[in-house]
Image: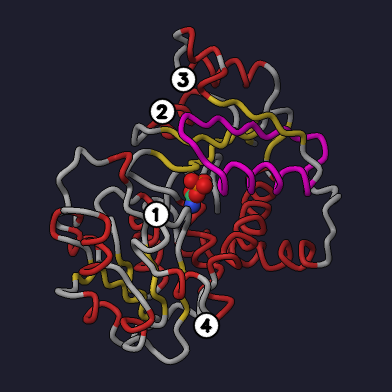
């Protein structure tokens, strides 16, 4: 079963993923009944420690913790003692000394959550580390797929966009392969990590090939902030040759769904008609993110006593 931390889906079993999704079903029921003053995490404290910008992940962890009765603290690197030269480990130990239970960390360096987890008593959740993983985004994506299709066996998932820089793509791939789905990726050659096939992905030669018969069409944001430049000529050129509009979606399965982790670059990876279209579950993903994070916080805190994992 789940250990002290959730650092990535590479090291998380299909059983643990399923246990989180199953627990999230009950959490979503509570949420949809507007029950937002629950006792599950009374007496617990959850800190979000974000060294990069975020709307969805930080807000949904904070709301998930609050809805379950936990105290919450937000630390952003720009306004904390990190600016005075404090190390990540010292920041974590300072939070430990205050009897904090969970740290949700987002950091531009891959592996930062793992380093922190080895050095603190708090449970550490990876809220996105560099180009490595974003496990809770993938978990909410899985929840959304399972709610629609019931199972992952043979599910055809097409992931299109900036796969090279995407921690969402990696967490999705690691988890979906374990759960029995078929993952096909498509990106400009400059945005596709070498050897991704060895991790279980099929690589398509065109967006049409990737989308053909897909149950799920997932777009990824072009991550301009992580690019050194020169990976494609212009955003409009990208949209013309790699973006997805209603015409491209005609090749997907008739009951397909459209997903995107957000934030979306409208008119770049997807047209507005696709983002706001009937098959888009992008807003439902955000709601499911709160339920999944409630479930994860609950499961990680269940075995903690006096600020430590037992
Ligand atoms: N999907 C996601 O991680 O969004 P934020 O950057 O807004 O947290």
In the image, residue 93 above or below residue 46: above
Measuring 24% from the left and 51% from the top, which residue is drawn there? Answer: 164
In magenta segment, residue 286: no
Image: magenta residue range: 41-68
Q: Looking at the image, which is closer to me, 190 or 274?
A: 274
Measuring 70% from the left and 23% from the top, which residue is drawn there? Answer: 99
User: In the picture, which quadrant includes the C terminus?
Assistant: top right
According to the image, label 3 marks what residue? 88
Q: Is residue 295 left or right of residue 215?
A: right
Q: Residue furthest bottom?
A: 254
Nearer to us of marks 1 and 3 is 1
Asked if disc 1 and disc 3 are in contact, CB closer than 8 Å, the reply is no
Ligand 1 within 8 Å of disc 1? The answer is: yes
In magenta segment, residue 60: yes
Where is residue 163 shown, x and y percent of the image? 27, 56
According to the image, label 2 marks what residue? 115
Nearer to us of marks 2 and 1 is 1
Q: CA distance from mark 2 to mark 1?
A: 20 Å
Q: CA distance from mark 4 to mark 1?
A: 21 Å
Asked if disc 3 and disc 2 are in contact, CB closer than 8 Å, the reply is yes
Q: Looking at the image, which is closer to me, 272 or 45?
A: 272
Other-residue count near label 2 (Cα within 10 Å), few / some / many at <14 / 14–19 / ≥20: few
According to the image, label 1 marks what residue? 168
According to the image, label 4 marks what residue? 149
């Amino acid at each position: 079963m789940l250990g002290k931390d959730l650092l990535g889906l590479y090291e998380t079993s299909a059983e643990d993923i399923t246990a989180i999704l199953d627990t999230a079903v009950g959490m979503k029921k509570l949420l949809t009944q507007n029950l937002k003053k629950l006792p599950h995490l009374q007496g617990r404290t959850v800190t979000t420690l974000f060294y990069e910008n975020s709307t969805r992940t930080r807000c949904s962890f904070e709301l998930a913790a609050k809805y379950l009765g936990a105290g919450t603290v937000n630390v952003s690197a720009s306004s904390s003692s990190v600016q005075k030269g404090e190390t990540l480990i010292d920041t974590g130990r300072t939070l430990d000394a205050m009897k904090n239970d969970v740290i949700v960390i987002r950091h531009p360096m891959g592996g930062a959550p793992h380093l922190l987890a080895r050095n603190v008593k708090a449970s550490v959740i990876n809220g996105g580390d560099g180009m490595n993983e974003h496990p809770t985004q993938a978990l909410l994506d899985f929840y959304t797929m399972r709610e629609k299709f019931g199972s992952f066996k043979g599910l055809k998932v097409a992931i299109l966009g900036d796969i090279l820089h995407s921690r969402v793509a990696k967490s999705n791939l690691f988890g979906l392969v374990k759960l029995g789905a078929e993952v096909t990726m498509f990106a400009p050659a400059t945005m596709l990590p070498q050897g991704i096939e060895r991790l279980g992905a099929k690589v398509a030669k065109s967006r049409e090939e990737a989308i053909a018969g897909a149950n799920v069409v997932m777009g990824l944001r072009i991550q301009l902030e992580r690019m050194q430049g020169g990976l494609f000529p212009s955003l409009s050129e990208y949209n013309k040759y790699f973006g997805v509009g209603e015409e491209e979606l005609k090749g997907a399965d008739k009951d397909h769904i459209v997903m995107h982790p957000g934030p979306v670059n409208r008119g770049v990876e997807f047209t507005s008609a696709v983002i706001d279209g009937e098959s888009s579950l992008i807003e439902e993903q955000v709601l499911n993110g709160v339920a999944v994070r409630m479930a994860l916080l609950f499961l990680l805190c269940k075995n903690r006593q006096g600020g430590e994992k037992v």
